[in-house]
Image (tube, rainbow, N blue to C red):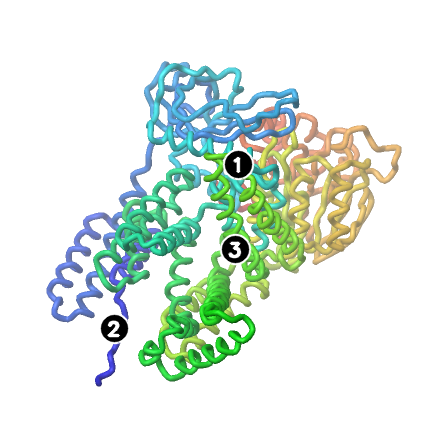
């Protein structure tokens, strides 16, 4: 009898998607007129038709045509930007409809609601204009602290609002490696920001929206109300995050622990979660005898409803498309190719928006599916699928003839064991019990294998986008995923029963509480482990290329013989270990003193790199508590810049004084970069400083107090402290005047870093005649600093003002800018220029503005 040869499935759409993606990447580097690309695409298409009798050649030409068309499409879309609304920064009256309803957030004595709006009319000094564009607005109101209905909505989807405000363009921090906040909002068609007092917002008559979306919004809010009735805090916030992807009410420390342990995916409505829920629903329907075609259609409809309900965005719709394509292929063909389905979904989304390829969400979604299907699937086919076939129909001896001898032997052994068990248990359930136990063990083994492969494959994107080496992700997911599934199923049952009887829903709600508490506890426990907080710098180009090649090699060799497959997995594992545990080389200029003023908004953060490569960070920015911002400047702004420079550790950090815009981000810096020393000035005790010193003690970081008159050398540099005064009688009541002021010298060149020193301190500094080529202007360009005597004593060539864009303080003041101009000092501002770098070679100074706009 001839041996049947199973043909390997083809994936033409996957190759087409890869060619299209390569064309988009090429569009970033190559530009030619559209006629060139049209001609090239036509030539490749004609060649593919001509060589159709030679399939390999025809496929190569066809993929080349797809590549060129992608390049053309990207360039056409990149050149057709939407005009921005005007005027920005002026007081206008906006009439708009609520297109996206946000939750109320309480911060101190203020309650905020963030909404997405679509404008109808914008009225300003030049008259009213009919304009349609997206606005993200924040409406706030003061409270007396006695209100309890924090889950009530003040404004709802479809309402028409009119309010006075000033429109601002979303702004990115001007540092290399900064998050593209403007691009992130543009994905939701948001091109302007606004804020207003809720009391000054007028609700206009009429409904402006879609009734279907209104009903979905009402269903979502009703579910949230039910969650609040069934669970107390913080379990309610966790259920809301797991079920609806809304983690706004979760404690930030818990969110960070989920990120540290690599389990953050359970809190968001990711494409993977939607796929798992969809396939679980399909499996359940098949178990209750629903037909294959009907079950597939119902699964797709349920997935679409869930995507609409959660409003989780593009990743969920990608997963929905992939499920729909998969079930279509299942209905039309006998053989399904998951990779081909992935390629079809990727091609559809890239055709709709070629710029999606550069987004982390798109890359992670498809990379996850590719790793599971292209690497994990073949491994499971070889490792566990034969055992699964051996556990089928154990009672049927005739099925043995369809299996290889080694699997038949396993079945015989299990029957013998079942016969022995009957002596103790009796009955006929021993053999099914053994089969079920075997399937559970195999399922656990498959889960571990897939998790291990995913962790190895995801090390590169996790390091590149999130700078995390999730070294505890495997044990954390082993605990988190089963607990999440149990808690989520029990929560869904409780919510469903609650619509019939709240009293009857208490039992499943209680059953859901235990795994949810265990989930939060395990994540906090593993997140507190020191190794869980391992952060990594942006991988080098060489590291990225080698890791990507190792991933492709593992995919190509996964279906080969066992030894070849293992040979393909070893480079992937080696690259994962390389990224996690081998520090990257900092990207710096040798033999010069580098002083970089990082754009942190209204605050200070300065990176000093010595000629020998030693690093010092002076201040880490921060946001005052009264602003109620969720942004952590140290974690979200300063750290990404340092990682983009390849910096994993800092030799020292310094805090000039304990004001929030200088010290607020330092806690994250201590955790992320583990500096060898912390320098502070001699200031009056402050709660913020005490908290930071406790953090330093926890990490074992020695603290050094510096005051005027201190001199020391390190890394080829000479440091001189000019303030605060060593005599305690000279301390003022102003914390700014107690700032740690440093003069950093290399050869005959130097930089003076003032912190927030004001006039009294500047007069004392001027008496020391601290000549410097670069001046970090004191107190963000406030009128309280930068006196003429200091400028005459220092006589700098360059000055830099670290200041927030459109800040409420009016910094920098005009008189300070005029004073600097009169002294012929070339002045940079971080709000206009972004990060500014100065290179001092011991004799001369040069400046560099990487993100000059």
Residue density around tag 3, few if under 14, some if 14–19, many if 20 or more, within 10 Å: some
Residue ID at (36%, 73%): 559
Task: Kindly identify which residue carries mark 1.
Answer: 227
Counting residues from the start of the chain, the first of labels 1 and 3 encountered is 1
| Disc ID at residue 481 | 3
Tell us which disc is closer to us: 1 or 2: 1
Residue ID at (33%, 34%): 82
Task: Kindly identify which residue carries mark 2.
Answer: 7
Q: CA distance from mark 1 to mark 2?
A: 51 Å
Residue 144: horizontal and vertical position, in percent? 65, 20
Residue ID at (58%, 38%): 231
Give left or right: position of 388 versus 342.
right
Counting residues from the start of the chain, the first of labels 1 and 2 encountered is 2
Res 382 visible: no
Res 138 visible: yes
In front of the other: 727 or 554: 554
């Amino acid at each position: 009898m001839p041996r049947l040869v199973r043909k390997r499935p083809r994936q033409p759409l996957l190759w087409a998607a890869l060619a299209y993606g390569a064309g988009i990447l090429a569009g970033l580097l190559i530009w030619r007129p559209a006629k060139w690309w049209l001609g090239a695409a036509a030539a490749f298409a004609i060649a593919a038709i001509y060589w159709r009798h030679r399939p390999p050649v025809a496929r190569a030409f066809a993929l080349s045509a797809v590549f060129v068309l992608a390049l053309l499409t990207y360039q056409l879309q990149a050149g057709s930007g939407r005009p921005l609304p005007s005027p920005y920064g002026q007081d206008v009256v906006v009439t708009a409809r609520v297109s996206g309803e946000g939750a109320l957030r309480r911060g101190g004595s203020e309650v905020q609601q963030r909404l997405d709006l679509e404008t109808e009319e914008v009225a300003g000094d030049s008259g009213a204009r009919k304009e349609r564009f997206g606005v993200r607005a924040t409406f706030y109101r003061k409270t007396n602290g006695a209100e309890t209905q924090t889950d009530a909505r003040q404004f709802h989807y479809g309402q028409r609002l009119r309010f006075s405000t000033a429109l601002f363009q979303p702004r990115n921090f001007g540092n290399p490696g900064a998050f593209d906040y403007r691009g992130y909002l543009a994905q939701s068609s948001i091109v302007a920001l606004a804020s207003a007092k809720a009391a000054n917002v007028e609700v206009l008559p009429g409904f402006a929206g879609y009734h279907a979306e209104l009903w979905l919004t009402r269903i979502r809010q009703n579910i949230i109300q039910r969650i609040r009735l069934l669970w107390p805090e913080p379990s309610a916030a966790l259920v809301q995050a797991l079920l609806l992807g809304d983690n706004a009410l979760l404690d930030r420390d818990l969110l960070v622990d989920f990120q540290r342990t690599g389990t953050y995916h359970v809190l968001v409505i990711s494409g993977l979660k939607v796929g798992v829920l969809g396939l679980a629903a399909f499996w359940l329907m098949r178990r209750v005898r629903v037909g294959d075609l009907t079950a597939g259609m119902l699964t797709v409809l349920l997935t679409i409803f869930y995507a609409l309900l959660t409003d989780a965005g593009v990743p969920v719709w990608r997963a929905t498309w992939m499920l729909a394509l998969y079930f279509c292929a299942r209905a039309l063909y006998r053989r399904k190719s998951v990779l081909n389905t992935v390629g079809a979904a990727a091609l559809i989304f890239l055709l709709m928006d070629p710029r999606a390829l550069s987004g982390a969400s798109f890359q992670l979604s498809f990379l996850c599916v590719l790793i599971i299907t292209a690497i994990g699937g073949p491994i499971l086919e070889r490792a566990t699928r034969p055992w699964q076939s051996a556990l089928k129909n154990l009672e049927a001896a005739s099925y043995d003839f369809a299996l290889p001898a080694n699997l038949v032997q396993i079945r015989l052994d299990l029957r013998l064991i079942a016969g022995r068990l009957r002596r103790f248990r009796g009955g006929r359930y021993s053999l099914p019990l053994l089969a079920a136990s075997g399937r559970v063990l195999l399922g656990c083994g498959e889960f571990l294998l897939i998790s291990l492969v995913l962790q190895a494959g995801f090390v590169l994107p996790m390091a590149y986008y999130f700078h995390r080496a999730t070294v505890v992700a495997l044990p954390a997911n082993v605990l988190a995923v089963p607990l999440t599934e149990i808690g989520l199923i029990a929560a869904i049952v409780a919510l469903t029963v609650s619509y019939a009887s709240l009293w009857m829903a208490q039992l499943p709600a209680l059953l859901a509480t235990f795994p949810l508490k265990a989930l939060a506890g395990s994540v906090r426990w593993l997140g507190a482990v020191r190794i869980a907080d391992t952060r990594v710098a942006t991988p080098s180009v060489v590291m990225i290329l080698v890791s990507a090649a190792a991933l492709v090699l593992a995919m190509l060799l996964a279906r080969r013989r066992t030894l070849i497959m293992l040979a393909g997995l070893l480079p992937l594992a080696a690259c994962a270990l390389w990224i996690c545990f081998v520090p990257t080389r900092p990207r710096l200029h040798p033999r010069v003193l580098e002083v970089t003023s990082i754009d942190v908004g209204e605050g200070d953060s300065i990176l000093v790199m010595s000629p020998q490569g030693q690093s010092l960070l002076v201040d880490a920015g921060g946001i005052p508590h009264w602003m109620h911002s969720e942004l952590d400047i140290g974690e979200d702004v300063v750290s990404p810049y340092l990682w983009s420079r390849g910096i994993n550790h800092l030799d020292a950090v310094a805090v000039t004084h304990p004001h929030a815009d200088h010290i607020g981000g330092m806690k994250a810096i201590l955790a992320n970069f583990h500096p060898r020393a912390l320098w502070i000035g001699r200031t009056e005790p402050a709660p913020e400083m005490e908290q930071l010193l406790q953090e330093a003690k926890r990490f074992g970081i020695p603290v050094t107090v510096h005051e005027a008159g201190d001199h020391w050398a390190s890394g080829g540099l000479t440091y001189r402290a000019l303030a605060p005064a060593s005599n305690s009688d000279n301390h003022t009541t102003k914390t700014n005047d107690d700032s740690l002021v440093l003069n950093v010298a290399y050869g005959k060149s130097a930089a003076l870093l003032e912190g927030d020193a004001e006039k009294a301190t500047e007069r004392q500094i001027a008496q020391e005649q601290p000549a410097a080529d670069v001046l970090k202007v004191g107190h963000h360009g406030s009128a309280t600093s930068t006196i003429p005597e200091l400028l005459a004593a220092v006589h700098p060539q360059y000055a830099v003002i670290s200041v927030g864009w459109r800040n409420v303080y009016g910094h920098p003041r005009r008189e300070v800018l005029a004073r600097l101009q009169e002294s012929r000092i070339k002045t940079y501002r971080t709000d206009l220029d972004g990060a500014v770098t100065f290179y001092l070679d011991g004799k001369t100074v040069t400046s560099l503005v990487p993100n000059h706009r």
